[in-house]
């Protein structure tokens, strides 16, 4: 296995689409890096450039210690798992696995040995004689994985390998890929638009937007310290709540105001960088899991509470997801618009309507015993450390 | 889901209903067989008549009532048609012409279609333009082509005729293969490239085998077209290069129509076409690419 380095990579398609811009990533030996981002952000294009299926417009790609920019795919010694698996329909499972080895002129016994070893690793032993069309979705997925690992390549490239499976199978295969990757110590670039996959699989996660890297970090850091509104809104489900707010000072403490309501900042949230924003507009972000029904947290101080009106209540058994309206204008930055559009066009329309009404819909994940009912007023507590602040113009996290 | 629910809710038929249902099924069955029978008669009747005519003595040709099967079948028409009346020459010419056309049309058609499907050669419109060449009625160009061929000294030349047939069959071959390559996921070839193929190997080891049904249909079309084409063969050949349809037509043009001989040669001409039909049927297995891609 080898390290993969991408430096200042750029791709502009002939008709002018700039799919990737100045992208630099380093994938360590044996590391699994996930490229994640909304559809159309350039993930597949990046992966295809690494594979050699797409020419680069600028930048360099290094696999191991070779610059591979001008090598054809077959000389790059990488394996790729395609979204639709791309199994050879006219070959049996055995032949599919043996194909890359045959092309490398390995001896018959060696091929047989390797095919059987990979098949065992993936539980495909009984399927070796079948054609791809006689396999279920999950089995095809395994064969596609098998065809990649049988090669023992320098690196694995996977383009949304689980997106064609149903939810249950996806979870199972996700764990399986995880296990295999650890077991083989395989340098892997994994592309997905599913942030749960990204968070669970990635040693590190690179989040892309419109061809540009937003942040590359461990899943935990991405969650705790998103660099901007876009990252904050993309990572986490349900997504972080955003509201237009203003910072101020009262009794020597920092305080954030949205609409008519204010929250006092906890020490863990009161970074010195915020001082510069006093009296200015900013974006306040709070994750749904950091909100709780005040009725369930009687000890919570009054200055960490705010009120809203319950719109929708979704009981999940273990918890209740409550959508509630707060009187304050939502933020409609470019980032927020794009995040909404990634859900669907209706989500953006909803946001625009809320903007007109000066109402923001928050989502909270409350304890299962909450009594919040649709139409009721509800008082909500923001946990310590829950408040994220972003610059209203640039959308960047206010740090330091 | 909905369909399953609907089926489950449908009440089971009562006894009376079942009888009505049963009768309806019987009536349907009878009608179906009657229809198929008529269709077969329509299809095979003429073929049978060609067959009996080819073995009838001359006296039995046009009797009233007709002779359904001759008392003393004869094979003289076959030897006359094949040996004395240039039947063999026609068959040989047809085989050469059709063979050349099939090979060239498929090779050139596949290459052109692959390039159009994978590299967008000719942009968006070339593919349709190619197909549109088939829309023109051939008769419109008979005279100009005759004149051109006379200038080029290609009259009564097998290769000249084959070249013309390639021009006629190529649009179909290209179109057929184009749709095949278009519906074949690019990822298959890309997977092959990553797995270690060169471009040519990817074409040869992956794309070509998967396009086999398309190749077989295109080849069958080119062969059958060249085997049966009459108009241009009649105009452009006279002696050396005559093809089977032209030879057969000449039998009927003599003072006394030689029904036996023409039937005999027609039968001989049908054999390769029938044989091809069986071959093609076996290879025309659609949906070979099913399972390559999870949908
Ligand atoms: N072959 C191509 N020609 C032109 N534009 C392309 C091509 N492939 C992708 N694009 C464009 O490049 C952008 C990035 O695409 P892609 O890498 O497929 O995104 P992702 O995989 O993140 O969904 C999109 O705007 C897409 O329309
Ligand atoms: Mg993609």
Image (cartoon, coloured by chain):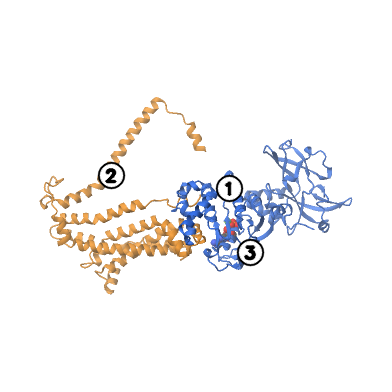
Chain colours: A blue, B orange
Residue at horizontal 44%, vertical 53%? Answer: A91
Q: Are marks 3 and 2 on the same chain?
A: no
* Contact flag, marks 1 and 2 (Cβ < 8 Å): no
Give residue B178's mark. none
Residue B183: where, in percent of width, then height? 46, 55
Residue A22: where, in percent of width, then height? 65, 65
Give residue A5's mark. 3
Residue B65: where, in percent of width, then height? 13, 44
Q: In which quarter of the image is ligand 2?
A: bottom right
Q: Is residue A66 left or right of residue A362?
A: left
Q: Is residue B222 visible?
A: yes
| Residue closest to the far front | A109
Badge 3 marks a residue whose secondary structure is strand
Residue at horizontal 27%, vertical 59%? Answer: B227
Please tell me whether mark 3 or mark 2 is closer to you in this view.
Answer: 3
**The residue at label 1 has a CB less than 8 Å from ligand 2:** no
Residue B50: where, in percent of width, then height? 20, 51
Badge 1 marks a residue whose secondary structure is helix
| Residue closest to the far left | B59
Q: How crowded is mark 2: few (under 14 residues within 10 Å), some or many (20 or more)?
A: few
Q: Are marks 1 and 3 on the same chain?
A: yes
Residue that badge 2 annotates = B39
Viewer-nearest residue: B20 or B278: B278
Residue that badge 1 annotates = A173
Viewer-nearest residue: B228 or A98: A98
Callout 2: residue from which chain?
B
Please tell me whether mark 1 or mark 2 is closer to you in this view.
Answer: 1
Q: Between marks 1 and 2, how big is the CA–CA gap?
A: 55 Å
Callout 3: residue from which chain?
A
Q: Between marks 3 and 2, how big is the CA–CA gap?
A: 70 Å
Q: Residues within 10 Å of mark 1 (few under 14, many from 20)?
A: some
Residue at horizontal 22%, vertical 62%? Answer: B90
């Amino acid at each position: 296995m080898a390290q993969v380095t991408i430096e200042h990579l750029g791709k502009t398609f002939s008709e002018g689409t700039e799919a990737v811009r100045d992208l630099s990533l380093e994938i360590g030996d044996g590391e699994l890096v996930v490229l994640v981002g909304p559809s159309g952000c350039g993930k597949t294009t990046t992966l295809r450039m690494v594979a050699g299926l797409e020419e680069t417009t600028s930048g360099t790609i290094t696999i191991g210690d070779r610059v591979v920019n001008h090598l054809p795919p077959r000389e790059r010694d990488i394996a790729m798992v395609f979204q639709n698996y791309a199994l050879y329909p006219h070959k049996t499972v055995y032949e599919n696995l043996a194909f890359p080895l045959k092309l490398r002129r390995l001896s018959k016994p060696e091929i047989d040995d390797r095919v059987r070893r990979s098949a065992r690793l993936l539980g495909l032993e009984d399927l070796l004689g079948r054609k791809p069309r006689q396999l279920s979705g999950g089995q095809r997925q395994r064969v596609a994985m098998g065809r990649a690992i049988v090669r023992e390549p320098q690196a694995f490239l996977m383009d949304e390998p689980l997106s064609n499976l149903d939810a249950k199978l996806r979870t199972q295969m996700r764990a399986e890929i995880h296990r295999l990757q650890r077991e083989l110590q395989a340098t892997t670039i994994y592309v997905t638009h599913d942030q749960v996959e990204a968070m669970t699989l990635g040693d590190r996660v690179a989040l892309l937007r419109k061809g540009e890297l937003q942040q590359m970090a461990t899943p935990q850091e991405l969650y705790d310290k998103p660099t901007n509104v876009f990252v904050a809104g993309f990572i986490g489900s349900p997504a972080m709540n955003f509201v237009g707010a203003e910072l101020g000072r009262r009794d020597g403490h920092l305080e954030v105001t949205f609409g008519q309501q204010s929250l006092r900042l906890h020490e863990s949230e009161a970074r010195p960088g915020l001082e510069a924003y006093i009296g200015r507009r900013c974006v306040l972000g709070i994750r749904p899991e950091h909100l709780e029904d005040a009725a369930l947290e009687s000890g919570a101080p009054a200055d960490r509470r705010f009120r809203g009106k319950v719109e929708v209540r979704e009981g999940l058994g273990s918890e209740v997801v409550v959508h509630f309206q707060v009187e304050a204008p939502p933020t409609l930055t470019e980032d927020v618009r794009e995040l909404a559009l990634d859900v669907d066009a209706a989500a953006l329309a909803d946001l625009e309507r809320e903007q007109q009404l000066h109402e923001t819909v928050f989502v909270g994940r409350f304890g299962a015993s909450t009594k919040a009912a649709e139409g009721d007023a509800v008082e909500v507590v923001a946990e310590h450390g829950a408040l994220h602040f972003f610059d209203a113009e640039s959308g960047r996290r206010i740090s330091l | 889901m909905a369909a399953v629910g609907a089926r489950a809710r449908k009440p089971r038929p009562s006894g009376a209903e079942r009888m009505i249902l049963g009768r309806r099924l019987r009536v349907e069955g009878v009608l179906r067989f009657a229809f198929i029978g008529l269709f077969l008669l329509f299809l095979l009747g003429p073929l049978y008549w060609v067959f009996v005519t080819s073995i009838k003595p001359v006296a039995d040709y046009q009797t009233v009532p007709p002779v359904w099967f001759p008392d003393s079948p004869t094979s003289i028409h076959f030897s006359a048609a094949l040996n004395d009346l240039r039947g063999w020459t026609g068959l040989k010419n047809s085989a050469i012409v059709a063979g050349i056309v099939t090979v060239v049309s498929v090779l050139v058609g596949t290459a052109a279609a692959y390039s159009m499907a994978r590299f967008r050669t000719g942009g968006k419109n070339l593919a349709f333009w190619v197909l549109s060449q088939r829309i023109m009625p051939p008769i419109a160009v008979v005279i100009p082509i005759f004149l051109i061929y006379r200038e080029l000294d290609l009259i009564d030349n097998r290769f000249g005729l084959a070249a013309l047939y390639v021009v006629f069959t190529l649009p179909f071959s290209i179109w057929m293969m184009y749709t095949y390559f278009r519906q074949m996921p690019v990822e298959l070839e890309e997977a092959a490239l990553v797995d270690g193929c060169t471009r040519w190997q990817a074409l040869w080891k992956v794309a070509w085998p998967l396009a086999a049904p398309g190749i077989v249909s295109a080849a069958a079309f080119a062969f059958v077209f060249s085997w049966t084409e009459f108009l241009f063969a009649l105009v452009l050949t006279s002696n050396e290069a005559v093809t089977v349809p032209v030879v057969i037509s000449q039998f009927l043009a003599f003072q006394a129509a030689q029904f036996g001989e023409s039937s005999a040669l027609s039968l001989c001409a049908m054999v390769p076409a029938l044989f091809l039909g069986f071959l093609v049927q076996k290879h025309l297995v659609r949906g070979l690419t099913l399972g390559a891609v999870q949908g």
